[in-house]
């Protein structure tokens, strides 16, 4: 949350000339309701069921840049789909960056907590090991401009693909 998945994903999609898909936006388009309303009506379990169903669909598409919500990783089947069907980039961010980037955001259901820092720390404690085990590439999300971050991530992805192609041909 607040790592820049959507911003960077859109830029990477342009860089690689691929369509961009934001999983939360897909959920909203399919339901006609915003993420916050889905959380209000169905709770997190209902939202996660919808998220998993659409991840199944969206991850089956070829040649897309897909930004998932940070909690998609919680479901073991989702992690399997991501690993099997895509190249997974974890934009690693720390709680301080998240607090700064999300300071004015009052829409995210999981941040509706008395102590945002504590909530983010708990989420990181649970999620970070799952991100680490799922990611093909871990990229620290620093205070770079979106353009510079895109250049760096695109270069890392391209280098990874080159190494993988060389390994296959060897």
Image (cartoon, helix red, strand yellow):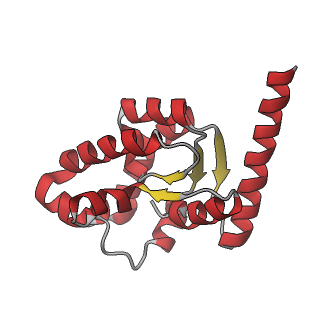
Q: Position of residue 165 (x, y in %)?
A: 80, 31
Q: Is residue 32 left or right of residue 56?
A: left
Give the image location of residue 107, x and y in percent. Answer: 30, 72
Q: Residue at x 35, y 35 (%)?
A: 75
Instruction: Report x, y in % for residue 102.
Output: 44, 72
Q: Quadrant of the C terminus?
A: top right
Q: Residue furthest top?
A: 170
Name the quadrant of the N terminus.
bottom left
* Residue 156 point in image, percent of width and height: 76, 49
Q: From the viewer's perspective, is residue 147 above or below residue 88? A: below
What residue is drawn where x is 40% and y is 57%? 120
**In-image side of 144 versus 86 (left or right):** right
The answer to whether residue 32 is left or right of residue 92 is left
Q: Residue at x 37, y 75 (%)?
A: 105
Q: How many marks?
A: 0
Q: Residue at x 20, y 45 (%)?
A: 45
Residue 101 can be seen in this image: yes
Visible residue check, residue 113? no
Which residue occupies the foreground of this view, 110 or 87? 87
The picture quadrant where one finds residue 88 is top right
Q: Nearer the viewer, residue 115 or 156?
A: 156
29, 41: nearer the viewer: 29
| Left or right: 159 in relation to 102 | right
| Residue 116, placed above or below residue 168 | below
Compared to 14, does 23 lie above or below? above
């Amino acid at each position: 949350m607040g790592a820049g998945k959507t911003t960077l994903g859109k830029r990477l999609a342009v860089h690689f000339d691929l369509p961009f898909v934001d999983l939360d936006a897909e959920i909203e388009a399919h339901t006609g309701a915003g993420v916050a309303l889905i959380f209000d009506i169905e709770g997190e379990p209902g939202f996660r069921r919808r998220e998993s169903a659409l991840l199944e669909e969206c991850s089956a598409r070829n040649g897309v840049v897909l930004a998932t919500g940070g909690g998609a990783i919680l479901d073991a089947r989702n992690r399997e789909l991501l690993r099997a069907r895509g190249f997974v980039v974890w934009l690693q961010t720390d709680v301080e960056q998240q607090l700064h980037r999300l300071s004015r955001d009052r829409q995210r259901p999981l941040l509706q907590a008395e102590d945002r820092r504590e909530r983010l720390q708990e989420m990181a404690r649970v999620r970070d090991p799952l991100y680490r085990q799922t990611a093909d590439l871990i990229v620290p999300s620093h205070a770079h401009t979106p353009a510079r971050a895109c250049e760096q991530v695109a270069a890392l992805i391209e280098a990874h693909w080159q190494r993988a192609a060389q390994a296959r041909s060897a």
